[in-house]
Image (spheres, rainbow, N blue to C red):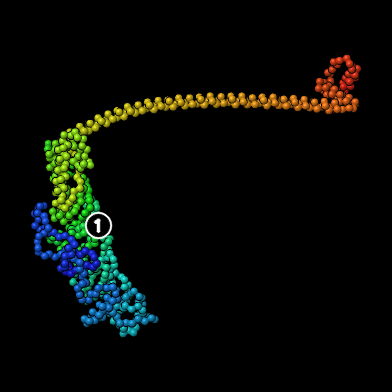
Amino acid sequence: MPAMSDMRSVAGGTTVVDDTDAMNTGMLKKIDFSNVNGFDSFKPSDNKTKKEPFVIAGDYMDENRPYLVKIGKDGVLAALQKLDLELRNTGQKRLLSKKAPVSWTGKEIIPGQLGLINHGGLPKILTRPGRYPGFPWRNWWARSWEGTRELSDTVVEFLGLKIVQVSQNQAAVISDPQNHIFVIKNSGFVALALEGSYKVLAVVDQTHLPNAVQDKVTRQVLGYTYEVTMKSSVAGTVKDFVVATFLNIPANNCAVLQRGDDLELLGAGQHYITNPNVTLRGLYTCGENQIEMPTKDIYTRDQVPVSLTIYLKWQLTSPLMLTTHGYNTPYDALRDKAQSVLTQIVSHLDYSAMVKQRNLGGDHLQINDGNDPSAAFLDALRTQAMDELHQAALEYGIVLKDLAVIDRQFKGDVAHQMEKLTTRALQTQVEAANVDRENSNKVKQEEGALQVARIKAQTKNTEADAEAYNALATARARAQALKIQTEAQAEATTLLAKADADAILLKAEADAKVQDQFAREMSLRRVDVERIKGYGNKTVFVPTSEAGRTTDAIMFGFGTSAGARAQQAP
């Protein structure tokens, strides 16, 4: 395995777990449980021996290291110049090339780039922008152009030269020439390894670690982890070894670390571990949790086995106390203790009392009718169970919020017989309910038929009323129409008669106004002609008086002759 660093290895405010000698920050708790023999013996360690701290806040580059320069606020170019000066002061080949740029031909370097030259296996860096021609030949006979790199690249590697600079939320895991592991954040360095090399094992995004750690019971995400490995050759075989572990712990969660017999608590935030002696014991949540879980078979006082399903609600307040007692999850601790407490309770109950009692849960699940003689005893047991389990949970750093038995299943011959009786009772209830349902359905059907008959009768009455009303309205309409027609005809006849009378009167008045005797005679003759035409030429008109008999005869003759001629005329 590669040797681990014995120096501080953190930059910024991220918590680091390493094996270097540094001051204990006092941010987290430490417990020694090497001499714990039981629950009552648990207490913080009184050992006064100075132990190496788990958590430090140092920087790998706080110490002066050959050919390693931290990138400061002046940037990469200033760090390269400082490294070049250190190389020249120690008699090594310079890093920065003395070539001057031109503007007319050659390899081009734009601002923000570095030019890389291979000078006999050693790196040469061009930092000034411009063009670098490939002549005179004496300047290039032992050199070759290797291209350019961006100054802002996270990692630049070239012939032992290493430039590393990480941004926010990034962390670079580095192995130095002695295989020491260190991590940098929010900064960077330039280094030249003349013996060995600096290897960038990984650049980690600390806010998006790939591996989610879930509680196996509640399925709640406790945090995120990522392990960085390094390949090492052991006996000719290349293997991957974990050299750094990154943790991202959400708010209200925590992690427990272990080194030997010592435990340490890490709060929420971003952390990483590079100490091989420190292991991650587990991740925990300090929020409330709840679960339903079954118990093993428990025997009542009359030896009837029963299986319970219990509801638990808890909150972990001290993960160190839980891990000290050897439990990996609060569920494991509560399950064992709840089984023990419920076994004690059920062993004092008879089967009949268990059947009568609805549950052993909290008050919000209990229905107490006040008539059960065993209710007081069961209430006392329920209170005792809650008190005992709550007190036991405190020893594990757990606060029990609620406990309830929400289901129970009796087993054995008694339970089988009871199941048969219960099944028969249920069948009887179902049959009775079916009979009641059928009777109710029949009554409802009869009521429905009666209601339909009533509706039909009302419909017929309504139709008869409508027909009678229509007939009456039709008769009234016909009578009214006949009356109007008769009145119209009478009025028309009256108007016609009046018109004829007026015509006759007007004609008589006109004839009376004629003074000429001949005209009168002609008018008289026209009257006779019209009379003969009206009554026929064979009609004999008898005078009604003696006076004017001769005249009448003459006139008659003239009239007859005139009528005959009129008929003969074509």
Quarter occupied by residue 31: bottom left
Between residue 451 and residue 378, name the one nearer to us.
378
Disc 1 secondary structure class: loop
Residue 117 versus residue 340 in the image, above or below: below
Between residue 123 and residue 401, name the one nearer to us.
401
Residue 195 versus residue 511 in the image, above or below: below
Q: Is residue 148 left or right of residue 404?
A: right
Q: Residue at x 22, y 62 (%)?
A: 271
Residue 487 visible from this viewpoint: yes
Q: Which residue is mark 1?
A: 251
Q: Residue at x 81, y 20 (%)?
A: 535
Going by the numbered disc 1, the residue's amino acid type is: Ala
Residue 377 point in image, percent of width and height: 14, 38
Density class for disc 1 (Cα within 10 Å; few <14, some 14-19, many ≥20) is some
Residue 346 point in image, percent of width and height: 14, 40
Between residue 412 and residue 492, name the one nearer to us.
492
Q: How many marks?
A: 1
Residue 68 point in image, percent of width and height: 23, 74
As drawn, which residue projects farthest toward the top? Answer: 546
Q: Quadrant of the N terminus?
A: bottom left
Q: Residue at x 12, y 39 (%)?
A: 348
Q: Residue at x 17, y 37 (%)?
A: 375
Residue 93 point in image, percent of width and height: 24, 81
Residue 240 visible from this viewpoint: no
Q: Is residue 450 left or right of residue 92?
A: right
Residue 358 versus residue 529 in the image, above or below: below
Quarter occupied by residue 29: bottom left
Q: Quadrant of the C terminus?
A: top right
